[in-house]
Image: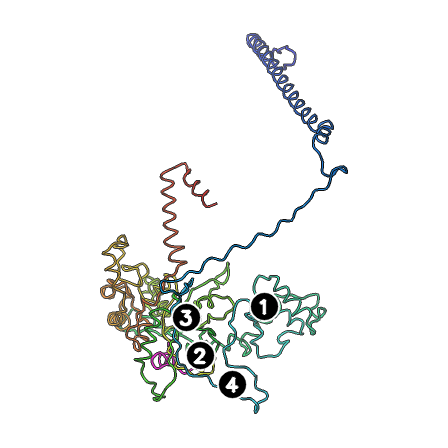
Amino acid sequence: MTLPCGAPGCSSELLSVGGQTLHRKNYQLWCTDESRRGALRRERAAAQSAKKAQKLKGKKKKNGPEAIADVYMGEPSNTHSDCPPLLTVQLPPPSPPPPPPQEFTQTGRLRCNYTLPRRYQDILPVPPPPPALEDEPEAPQTSLLPQPHLTFENAPQASLFGYLSQAPPWPFKNMSTWLFMNYFNSGSATKSAAEANHLVHDVLQHPEFDAASLGSDFDALRENHQLDNALKNSESSPFLRQFTSQLIEIDIPSGKKDVPSTKFAVPGLLYRKLTSVIEAAFHDPLAHRQEERVMGEIYTSDAFIHEHDLVQRCSPVPPDDPGCKREKVVVAVMFSSDGTHLANFGTAKAWPIYFMVGNLSKYFRGLPNSGAMHHLAYIPSLPDSFQDVASKVHANWKTQKKNITTHCQRELMHAVWDFLFDDDFIHAYKYGMVIMCADGIERQVYPRLFTYSADYPEKVLLVTICDKGLCPCPRCLVQKSMLDRLGLARDSTVRSKLWEFVKEKVTLARHIIYNLRQSITGTRVKELLKNISAVPTMNAFASKLSTVDTSFNTSKMLVVDLLHEFELGVWRTLFKHLIRLLYAASPQGNLVAELDLRYI
């Protein structure tokens, strides 16, 4: 049986009389408190409403018609009909400041703001006059004299279709499609106002352009696929005409005493001959102004001047031209390479090798359309069939898979460079090569390798040392345990010992691997090479170039890579350490917030 509360507004039911009495008492107290709280809330709401009404009334009084009338009555207006117009006085223009007094030196000469070393005029051969072309009326009337200096503004737009030997509209169906695809594949990837003008003037307003012939189903992606299929394995391709495909052979060790090493051919090397690239670079016009030695260029460096003097005094006479009287010049060869991914998704990648001529100014080489950077070759990767062959050839493939693959990748890298340093380049390195330059004068050109720009993993491959081994630096023999002494006086003594390619030790290590069929990372190989962090790979730079230039050192050609070694390396590590110090000094992050404010 349940007992109702009985109070107005309460529907509770109790089980006993005592519970009913206690509930009624507590319910009355709650109702009293609730009524008091409700009255307090109503008082607060009324006070806030009165305050808002008072504030709104004050704003209306301030902006009312009486206030506006007071403003017009109290302030005179210049636009009134009784007021005279304002007079404007034209002040004379200020006189220009007097010119600064001329400064004179102690000897009485007029002082110049800048001085450069005087260069005395050399007596050089006079270029012959342009040949007469009356007998050949169809020959192009092009001059071999130096052309105007190429800049970013007047540089011609590179177009793929300009190199095709087939006449347009090949490989498309009509001329309108050819014109539009030529526009689409030329110029910059991001079309700007200049590109829009190029579209209007050179494509849409072209007399042979017909928009109706494009059709309603025009698809640029489909047309590009058609172009790719037409250029594939075609003699009209500008890339296949400039590059040559070649197989590169490397040796895979067997790991058995009675089984010799196996030759493995790696396909896909696209290359251009070094001598042909140098010759093409010297055919183009170079500087057309008076030369002055200003520090900051390769051709004004002490190393270049030293090589120039050696060529003038010590270069051997070419055996095919004993009476050579041509002018001898040095071409500064600059290499660079960097593996890159061709897409954000997938495994498509390329490993290009670039070639630059240091005789050109760095400002000219930096122009995007100058054409000063030449594609020399594309290093292939080990194909998928390599693992199938190596697993059958090597006896311990399962346990030494990583070491064998790394060794063969180093072998492939230097096999490519050994192929690029062919007999023609070595002959030109020693005796020079005859090139008809842009001014019509034949010169004896001597290529000299000055710099090679690469990141640390590629430097390790080029110098043939272990990646982060006992001696991690590709230029000196400083050990990893001594890196904390950087900047000390005794550290300079260690760094003065440049790393040199030890051909005898590497040859003996390769004999142990390929002839005695021992492990690549075996004890005998480590005893020979570990103390200098060398690897059992024959360095192509040392084996080829040191035969004609005994002073050549592979370590000296590697230059500092500011992007990878400093900006993304040393400085980023130092900056992260400084931020850790700020967090340690102020765990709440106040100092880090102050640092962020200073960078705003």
Q: Which numbered marker is on residue 279?
A: 2
Q: Which numbered marker is on residue 130?
A: 4
Q: Nearer the viewer, mark 1 or mark 3?
A: 3
Q: Nearer the viewer, residue 128 or 249?
A: 128
Q: Which residues are magenta?
A: 418-435
Residue matched to label 1: 185
Give the secondary structure at mark 4.
Answer: loop
Residue matched to label 3: 292
Question: What's the CA distance linking mark 4 and mark 2?
Answer: 20 Å
Crowding at mark 2 (Cα within 10 Å: few <14, some 14-19, many 20+): some
Q: Nearer the viewer, mark 2 or mark 1?
A: 2
Q: Earlier in the sequence, mark 4 or mark 1?
A: 4
Question: What's the CA distance linking mark 2 and mark 1?
Answer: 28 Å
Is 419 magenta? The answer is yes
The answer to which image quadrant residue 52 occupies is top right
Give the secondary structure at mark 3.
Answer: loop
Q: Position of residue 530 (x, y in %)?
A: 25, 62
Crowding at mark 4 (Cα within 10 Å: few <14, some 14-19, many 20+): few
User: At 36% across and 49% down in the image, what residue appears?
Assistant: 574
Q: Position of residue 352 (x, y in %)?
A: 44, 68
Give the amino acid type for the residue marked by disc 4 in the picture. Pro
Q: Nearer the viewer, residue 110 or 300?
A: 110
Q: Earlier in the sequence, mark 3 or mark 2?
A: 2
Is 124 magenta? The answer is no
The answer to which image quadrant residue 384 occupies is bottom left
> Can residue 144 be seen by looking at this rendering?
yes
